[in-house]
Amino acid sequence: MSNRIAYDKVAPAGLKNLFAMEGYLTQKTGLDNKLRELVKIRVSQINGCAFCLNMHTQDARKIGETEQRLNVLVAWRETSLFTATEEAALALAEKLTRIADNQISEVFYQEIRAFFDEKYFTDLVLLITQINTWNRISIVMANEVE
């Protein structure tokens, strides 16, 4: 399968904004690098985005993420390999990615906020919405795994 549209050439201004957000998320936040990649991978697993899964598992390995954790990420609740903070971020990622079926209750919000200050929480939400956007673009445009 090949890209359906050369969207980077058709809508460069729109993509410029997405890349600017990527720059913010990687350079202007205090988000932990491994946590950032775990969230991107988990959201991409839920959405079934092979392109993003391929990219972000490679990125995670480059920064020292273990094969064991990557292998069990889909079942993170069933293992003790992840920190409580990582579990909170993954729970938020799952809820936000499946928001139509999983409303964010006040109880859930308060449980997650116990792990993150306002800025970190906000940046985490931006990260989750950003990877959901990339997943949807990659899937509909049929980005190839190379």
Image (tube, helix red, strand yellow):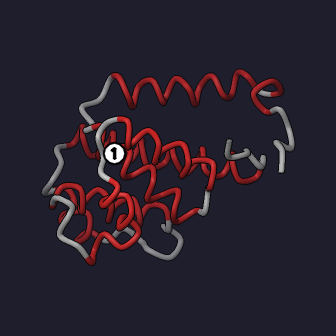
Q: Residue at x 56, y 48 (%)?
A: 54
Q: Does 90 sit above or below residue 143?
A: below
Q: Does 27 sit above or below residue 102?
A: above
Residue in the foreground of this view, choosing between 99 and 5:
5
Q: Quadrant of the C terminus?
A: top right
Whole-percent x, y for residue 120 in the image: 24, 40
User: Which amino acid does the dot numbered 1 rest on?
Assistant: Leu
Q: Residue at x 41, y 25 (%)?
A: 24
Whole-percent x, y for residue 39 in the image: 38, 52
Judged left or right of residue 115, residue 50 is right
Whole-percent x, y for residue 144 in the image: 73, 45
Q: Quadrant of residue 118?
A: top left
Q: Residue at x 46, y 48 (%)?
A: 57
Residue in the foreground of this view, choosing between 144 and 113:
144
Q: Which residue is mark 1?
A: 124
Whole-percent x, y for residue 12 in the image: 73, 22
Judged left or right of residue 91, residue 17 is right
Q: Residue at x 68, y 28 (%)?
A: 14
Judged left or right of residue 47, residue 9 is right
Residue in the foreground of this view, choosing between 79 and 30:
79
